[in-house]
Each structure stands twice: as structure tokens, then as C-alpha cells.
Image: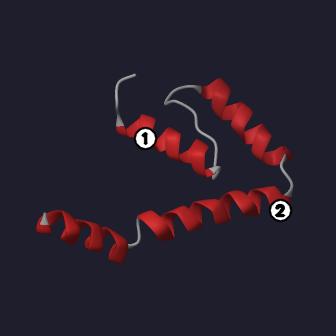
Amino acid sequence: MKLTLKNIENKILKEVDCGLTAESGDFKTLAENVIAMYRKTEEERLQLGMNGQTYYKVHFQKKVCIDKLDQTMKI
């Protein structure tokens, strides 16, 4: 599999369990995902959001990114 930003995004969404994905132009999968989200309970949808927020805080907050960059520059 070719490593692309889209593949990384899809992998993160699946591993973190924070949402659903569809390839660009794949309207069938998009529609299926909309229905799947509609069928989830409010609690399940909130959990997806919380999973995404937690992942963001651990990996992408400004301080985290600056610290990682700082460590990389020191090597």
C-alpha cells in the first residue's frame, strides 16, 4: 500500500475509533456512513467525539507538536 496522507488519516480514524471514512467521490460509502451514524445512539456518537479529542490532545496540541519538533532538532 502506498503511504499517503489519506491512508494515515483512515488508519488513525479506525485505530482511535473516532469516526467513519469514505474515499473522495465514493457517494455510496458516504451515504452508508451517514446512515450508520444516524443509527448510533447519542452515547456512541459522543464517545466517538471524545475518542477524537483525546487523540488530538495527546498527539496534536500545539505544545506537544512544539516539544516533538524541539526534540527532533536536538538530535
Measured along the vertical axis of the image, is residue 41 above or below residue 3?
below
Does residue 27 appear to the left or right of 38 in the view shown?
left
Q: Identity of the amino acid at label 1?
A: Ile
Q: Farthest residue to the bottom: give it.
A: 63
Does residue 35 appear to the left or right of 13 in the view shown?
right
In the image shown, does 68 or 4 lie closer to the viewer? Answer: 68
Kind of element beneath mark 1: helix
Mark 2, residues whose alpha carbon is within 10 Å: few (<14), some, or many (≥20)?
few
Query: Which residue sits at x=36%, y=72%?
Result: 64
Query: Which residue sits at x=27%, y=72%?
Result: 66
On residue 70, the disc is none
Residue under circle 1?
Answer: 8
Mark-to-mark CA distance, 2 and 1 = 27 Å
On residue 43, the disc is 2
Image location of residue 35, percent across then percent down: 79, 38
Mark 1, residues whose alpha carbon is within 10 Å: few (<14), some, or many (≥20)?
few
Measured along the vertical axis of the image, is residue 66 above or below residue 47?
below
Query: Which residue sits at x=72%, y=41%?
Result: 34
In the image shown, does 32 or 1 lie closer to the viewer? Answer: 1
Q: Identity of the amino acid at label 2?
A: Glu
Give the quarter of the figure containing the C terminus. bottom left
Does residue 71 appear to the left or right of 27 in the view shown?
left
Measured along the vertical axis of the image, is residue 45 above or below residue 9?
below
The quadrant where residue 21 appears: top right
Image location of residue 45, percent across then percent down: 76, 57
Q: Earlier in the sequence, mark 2 or mark 1?
A: 1
Count of numbered circles on the image: 2
Does residue 13 appear to the left or right of 48 in the view shown?
left
Question: Colour mode?
Answer: secondary structure
